[in-house]
């Protein structure tokens, strides 16, 4: 349990937080004895292209291993050969450049922990049912990324005056014609305003949790745009184009956009920073929870560029709230694990909710904002359990 004498940081980074009930099988006990508890395999949401969800109920650590990190692909995974792969930087730059993999790996590297959440995470809970991948809780993960700051690469090419956007293009292509996109095949591409592109938390990563970037996560190189929804973290990066006007590509306007109200008008706006959000790992919806026994309600919370300031939990459908305990220390751009000890006193159906607030005063909403279309689903999700 939590109050043991283990150094908390060490504990958070390397081992499980607690003995999870799904660990009770024989193989699991063996794994536990070995010190590395198991997380069930990724949930297949789509086979082609592959879209895989992290089984969020099994959340038991701060860093999600590479083979359990959710996968969100729009097109088939491109197989890239290091011998021929280049990163091209062009557009509104003083000199267009082509960088080889080995050259990039020789540049000064940085490592950061960052939570990636797909803008469509939780879509599967929307009523009426929404189009798109029906993610439940697990289109989110937290990993340690190593690479070079995007700013360093931009500096090598020399950004020209008047530049506003940095377009990141992947090597993967396919058709989005059926979803209102242009005809023929297009590449996945997403852009950042120059100011965000130059920030230190935006890196071009070639390592993930200490291993070379796996193919599913963008080998050989991907952007990691910490604090922003996942679509900005372009995988299989191939080209960077600096532009003099805001990029209006398919994945920047038709897809991954919402309606922002400005002066009474509904304005199509690209999705950027992650909203403040807490998710409950356990209990899960429909779980049977024993009456008059202590139960560890727990989960994770994240807040984009801000720190998570607090998480509150309700065990009466949102009428009253109690503060949860934030675990470990805040790490910029990383989610924070939290727990709340609950002893249900009466049998029956109970609805739990978790709600986060951040250091900028943002509070997680309790209801859905339809202007967000099928993205940025950040309202507190009710978890109804059966106390017996
Ligand atoms: N080239 C490319 N990059 C991409 C995507 C993609 O389909 N192609 N998906 C984006 C989306 S929507 C998300 S949420 C993240 C997911 O990263 P992951 O698969 O490593 O979890 O990658 C982003 N980068
Ligand atoms: Mo996404």
Image (spheres, rainbow, N blue to C red):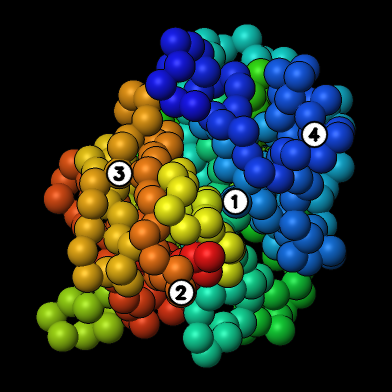
Q: CA distance from mark 4 to mark 1?
A: 18 Å
Label 1 belongs to which residue? Answer: 56
Looking at the rendered structure, the secondary structure element under dot 2 is strand
**Does any atom of ligand 1 lie closer than 8 Å to the CB of label 1?**
no
Q: Which mark is residue 324?
A: 3
Q: Residue at x 40, y 70 (%)?
A: 351
- Disc nearer the start of the sequence (1/2): 1
Q: Which mark is residue 233?
A: none
Neighbourhood count class around disc 4 (C-alpha, 10 Å): few under 14, some 14–19, many 20 upward = some
Looking at the rendered structure, the secondary structure element under dot 4 is helix
Q: Residue at x 58, y 73 (%)?
A: 124
Q: Which mark is residue 28?
A: 4
Looking at the rendered structure, the secondary structure element under dot 3 is loop
Q: Residue at x 45, y 69 (%)?
A: 347
Q: Which mark is residue 349?
A: 2
Q: CA distance from mark 1 to mark 3?
A: 19 Å
Q: Position of residue 39 (x, y in %)?
A: 71, 40
Res 350 → quadrant: bottom left
Q: Is residue 205 left or right of residue 212?
A: left
Q: CA distance from mark 3 to mark 2?
A: 21 Å
Neighbourhood count class around disc 2 (C-alpha, 10 Å): few under 14, some 14–19, many 20 upward = some
Res 310 → quadrant: top left
- Disc nearer the start of the sequence (4/1): 4
Q: Position of residue 99 (x, y in %)?
A: 66, 25
34 vs 56: above or below: above
Neighbourhood count class around disc 3 (C-alpha, 10 Å): few under 14, some 14–19, many 20 upward = many
């Amino acid at each position: 349990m939590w109050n043991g004498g283990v150094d908390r940081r060490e504990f958070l980074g390397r081992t499980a937080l607690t003995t999870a009930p799904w660990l009770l099988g024989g193989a699991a006990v063996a794994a536990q004895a070995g010190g590395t508890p198991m997380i069930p395999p990724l949930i297949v949401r789509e086979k082609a292209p592959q879209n895989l969800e992290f089984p969020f109920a099994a959340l038991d650590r701060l860093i999600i291993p590479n083979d359990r990190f959710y996968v969100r692909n729009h097109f088939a995974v491109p197989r890239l050969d290091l011998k021929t792969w280049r990163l091209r930087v062009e557009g509104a730059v003083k000199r267009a450049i082509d960088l080889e993999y080995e050259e990039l790996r020789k540049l000064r590297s940085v490592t950061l922990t960052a939570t990636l959440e797909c803008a469509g995470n939780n879509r599967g809970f929307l009523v009426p049912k929404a189009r798109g991948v029906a993610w439940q809780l697990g289109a989110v993960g937290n990993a340690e990324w190593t690479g070079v700051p995007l700013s360093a690469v931009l500096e090598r090419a020399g950004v020209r005056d008047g530049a506003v956007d940095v377009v990141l293009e992947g090597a993967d292509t396919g058709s989005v014609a059926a979803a209102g996109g242009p005809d023929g095949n297009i590449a996945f591409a997403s852009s950042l305003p120059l100011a965000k592109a130059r920030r230190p938390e935006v890196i071009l990563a070639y390592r993930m949790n200490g291993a070379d970037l796996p193919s599913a996560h963008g080998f050989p190189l991907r952007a990691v745009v910490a604090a922003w929804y996942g679509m900005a973290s372009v995988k299989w990066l191939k080209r960077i184009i600096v532009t003099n006007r805001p990029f209006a590509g398919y994945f920047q306007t038709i897809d991954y956009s919402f309606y922002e109200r400005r002066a009474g008008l509904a304005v199509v706006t690209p999705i950027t920073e992650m909203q403040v959000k807490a998710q409950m790992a356990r209990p899960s919806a429909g779980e049977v929870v024993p009456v008059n026994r202590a139960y560890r309600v727990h989960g994770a919370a994240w807040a984009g560029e801000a720190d998570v300031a607090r998480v509150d939990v309700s065990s009466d459908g949102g009428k009253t709230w109690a503060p949860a305990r934030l675990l470990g220390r805040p790490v910029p751009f990383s989610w924070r694990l939290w727990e709340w000890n609950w002893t249900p006193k009466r049998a029956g159906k109970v609805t739990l909710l978790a709600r986060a607030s951040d250091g900028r005063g943002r509070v997680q909403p309790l209801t859905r904002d339809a202007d967000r279309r099928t993205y940025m689903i950040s309202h507190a999700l009710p978890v109804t359990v059966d106390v017996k």
